[in-house]
Amino acid sequence: MAGLYIHVPFCSKRCLYCDFVSNTDMRYKEPYVAALIQEMALRAPYLSGEPIETIYFGGGTPSQLSASDFRTLFEVIQKHFTLMPEMEITLEANPDDLSASYIQCLRTLPFNRLSMGIQSFHDDDLRLLNRRHTAAQAIEAVDRCQQAGLTNLSIDLIYGLPSQTKTAWEDNLAQALALQVPHLSAYHLTYEEGTALYRLLEEGKVQPVEEEVSLSLFNTLIDQLAEAGYQHYEISNFAKPGFYSRHNSSYWIGKSYLGLGPSAHSYNGREREWNVASLPIYIKGIERGEPQLEREELDLPTRYNDFVITRLRTQWGIACDELVSTFGEKWLSYCLQQAQRSLQQGLLTHEEGRLRLSRRGLFLSDGVMSDLLWV
C-alpha cells in the first residue's frame, strides 16, 4: 500500500522561515490544478498499481484552494488510483482560512484529518514569523473545526525562537493542551539559507537561542506532552493513542509514495524522483507531457542509509531482524559496530532486538544517525 502527496504551492504571504516552494500569485491556480490533473494521468504508473491508503495535501497553503478545486481533484484521483477503504486524507490549513463556511465546505469532501499551522499562541511570535493569523484566530479555528465534527486535528508549533524563554514555551504548550487536539507536531526553528529569516541572521538582527535553551525547551515539550497522555512516536511528533499520522509514518517505515506538484518527492523502494522546484516550469513541462523531474536510482548503501535515518527517527527504532531480512547479516554487523560509541555514551539503547534513540539521543539525533551511515 502506498501514499499520495499533493503539493499546493500557494500562500497569501511568505512566512519568515519558510523555504518550501510557494507562490503568492493566485493567477497560477487554474493552470496548476489543470497540471495536477494531467500529472496524475502521466505518473500514476510509478506506483505499479499499489493501492493508495493515505492522501496528504501539503504546502504552501492547501486551504487556499476552493471546495470546487478539491472536488475536481478527488474525482481524478478516483479515476487513476485504487483507493483503500478507511483511508486517512489530510489537509494542511491556515487558521485564518478556516471560516465557518469553509469548514462546512470541507465537511462535504473526503477529508478526515486536518493539520493546522498555528506555530505559536503568542501574537509577538506570529508577527515575527510573518504569520497572517492571530493567536485568537487560531483558538477559534480549532473550536470551529471541533464543533463541526472535524476532531482528528493536528497542530504545528515552533520553538527555539529568538529570545524565547522556557516560561513562554510552557505557556504555548499549556494553550495547545487546553485545545485537546489528538496530535501535535513541534519543530525547532531553523535558519534555512535563502529565507528572510536567514537574511536577518546574516545582518545580525536576530540571534539563535543557545543550545542549553534549546535542550530545555525540548525536554519541556517531551515532559508536558507525556504527562498529558501523548505518545512521542517520532522526533517531532506526538499523538494520543490511535492518532498517529499514518501518511507521515509511511515515510518513516519505507512505504512507497507518489508526490505530485512542484518540488514534490516520490519513492518506490528502488528510486527517488522529485519535481522541479518552480511552479511555472512545472506547469509548462506537464502541459508538454514532459514532467520536469530528476531521478535517483537507489543502490544498496543508499537504501541502507535511508533505512537507518527514517527508522531511527521513530519510537520503534531499527528492528535488527528487519535490517537483516532487507540487507543481510553483513549490514547488521556494520550497523552494530558503528553504534558502539553512541551505545556507550547512552545516546542509543539496544533492547528487544531494536536500536532506539535514548532521551538524550533524541536531541543529538543527527550525529547519532551520521555515525551509523555507510560512507
Image (cartoon, helix red, strand yellow):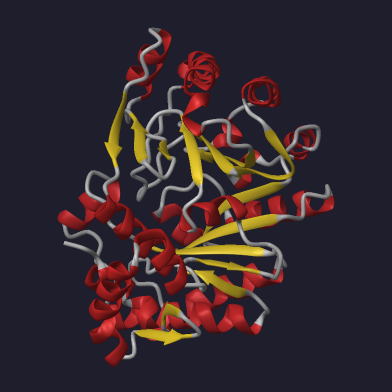
Q: Quadrant of the C terminus?
A: bottom left
The residue at the point 49 percent across, 35 percent down is: 258
Position of residue 13 relative to residue 347, above or below, is: above
On the image, which quarter does residue 218 sit in? Answer: bottom left
- The number of numbered discs placed on residues in the rendered structure image is 0
Position of residue 175 relative to residue 280, above or below, is: below
Camera-side residue of 367 and 221: 367
In-image side of 150 versus 21 (left or right) = right
The residue at the point 47 percent across, 38 percent down is: 60
Position of residue 205 relative to residue 93, above or below, is: below
Q: Is residue 10 visible?
A: no
Position of residue 172 relative to residue 243, above or below, is: below
In-image side of 39 versus 361 (left or right) = right
Q: Is residue 241 visible?
A: yes
Camera-side residue of 230 and 82: 82
On the image, which quarter does residue 219 sit in? Answer: bottom left
**Residue 56 point in image, percent of width and height:** 58, 41
Camera-side residue of 21 and 284: 284
**Residue 230 point in image, percent of width and height:** 64, 75
The residue at the point 76 percent across, 33 percent down is: 109
**Residue 364 point in image, percent of width and height:** 31, 76
**Residue 248 point in image, percent of width and height:** 53, 53
Q: Quadrant of the N terminus?
A: top right
In-image side of 338 versus 187 (left or right) = left
Camera-side residue of 168 and 116: 116
